[in-house]
Image (cartoon, rainbow, N blue to C red):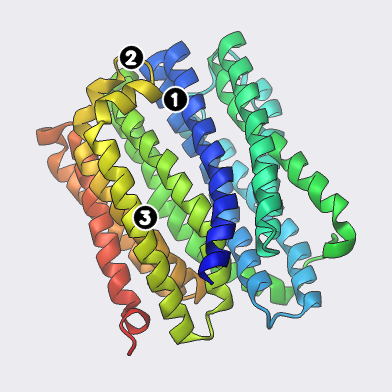
Amino acid sequence: MKSNFLKNSSWSFTAVAFRALGGLSINKLFSIFLGPSGLTLLSHFQNLTALFTLLPSEGVNRSLMKYWSDPRVPDEERKQLFKTAIWVTTFIFGATLAVLYFWKKEYFFDRFISAYTPKEFLIVFIPAVFLMLLSGYLNSVILALREVKAYAIINIIGLLLLVAVVYLGVTMGNADQALLSFSVGYGLMFFCALFYLIKKRKAFNLGIGLPDGKSIKRIGKFLAMAISVIVFGRLLDFMVRDYVIDLYGLERTGLWQAVSKMSTSYLLVFTGTVGVVYYPKMSSLIHEPQALKSYVGKVMGFVAFVSLLALTVYFLNKEFILKLFFAPGFERAAYLVRYQVVGDFLSILSYLLAYLLSARVEMAKYIFAQFFSAAIYVIIIYSFIDFYNLEALTLAYMWRYIGFFVILVFLNRRLLFRS
């Protein structure tokens, strides 16, 4: 198990290391050419695209990985699940667009549309984000098939395309084009995954067709958990950031976003390296409690050690690292790092435990844990923003994940402390 885990992890690490570096390169480009205000808008725009992509990613794609990783699921049912998932993903995209743009356009979109007309903006935004959804969908199939090497190569190629497109958008376009280049670049990743699956079509026997009720029911359980991630995660983040922009302005908010985006970058390395190997393997052991407990314990111990080491290095060199990965002047945000790194450490461990609830499809517990942590976050921001200003946001982040970790240990206690 250990050698296979490390082998797959090395490929996934290579992919997400490139992805993290790509993300940091994009942050650097925006901070250099558009300053803290541009970095704030980028964070806000990425949060907007996540409202479109997160439900399919956490709901549809994770259900695919869960059931395709289960050896007891027949091949015909897997194929039907694949077909149904395409329809569900398309419906989610249309419903999300209807709610966010046609119902609340002013709140969700107006900050990003300045040089373009709304129609011109949507002509680029809609197909780009839809391709982002399909890219994640096809990549989840590749992961479920344990084709980690192929997944890594596809993502590296796609990442190079992304950075190239963003570079052109930032250096040669206006603010609208710079933001849209991010979604266009990610959308191009779809064609890399599509090319691979077409090439391997005989081995995987995939196809398109009508949805079926059994597959919809399976996907629906994961969608309910994913909705909680959106409401108590990305939507809440969007609302908090919008509030902070109004309170402190784009420039000052950009300092907080620099620290937040550093967290996003190394958390991506964690979720990409461990998650792509850990979740499918854990799903395959879900009916073997002792083997599952042993596997989770080994992975958590390894991840805790590496994370503690990396976060300590970051904390001790925070001014240098912020200046390195962003434009000069962003080292002023270093004072925000101390609470953030504590929250990041517990966030990493919490994700491993949250995967357990997801793999066991314990929907009510999963949603409760998300709500519990979100409530802590909002209460602390509300209580301390007037006293600590921007630092209240990282303080709230830390306590959010302390609470999230504690409640997840409690909810998983029967497995974790099984004799």
Q: Residue at x 29, y 37 (%)?
A: 314
N-term-proximal mark, 2 vs 1: 1
Tell me which amino acid carries mark 2.
Pro
> How far apart are the two marked residues, 3 and 1, measured between alpha carbons?
26 Å
Which residue position is annotated with label 2?
Answer: 328
Determine contact: label 3, label 1, CB under 8 Å. no
Q: Residue at x 26, y 22 (%)?
A: 331
Query: x, y percentage for residue 359?
Result: 51, 72
N-term-proximal mark, 3 vs 2: 2
Determine contact: label 3, label 2, CB under 8 Å. no
Which residue position is annotated with label 1?
Answer: 41
Indicate the secondary structure of the residue bearing disc 1: helix
Note whether residue 143 is visible.
yes
Quadrant for the N terminus in the image: bottom right
Mark in the foreground, 2 or 1:
2
Q: Is residue 157 left or right of residue 407?
A: right
Say which quarter of the image contains residue 87. bottom right
Query: x, y percentage for residue 117?
Result: 62, 18
N-term-proximal mark, 3 vs 1: 1
Mark in the foreground, 3 or 1:
3
**Alpha-carbon neighbours of circle 3 within 10 Å: few (<14), some, or many (≥20)?**
many
Tell me which amino acid carries mark 1.
Leu
> How far apart are the two marked residues, 3 and 2, measured between alpha carbons?
29 Å
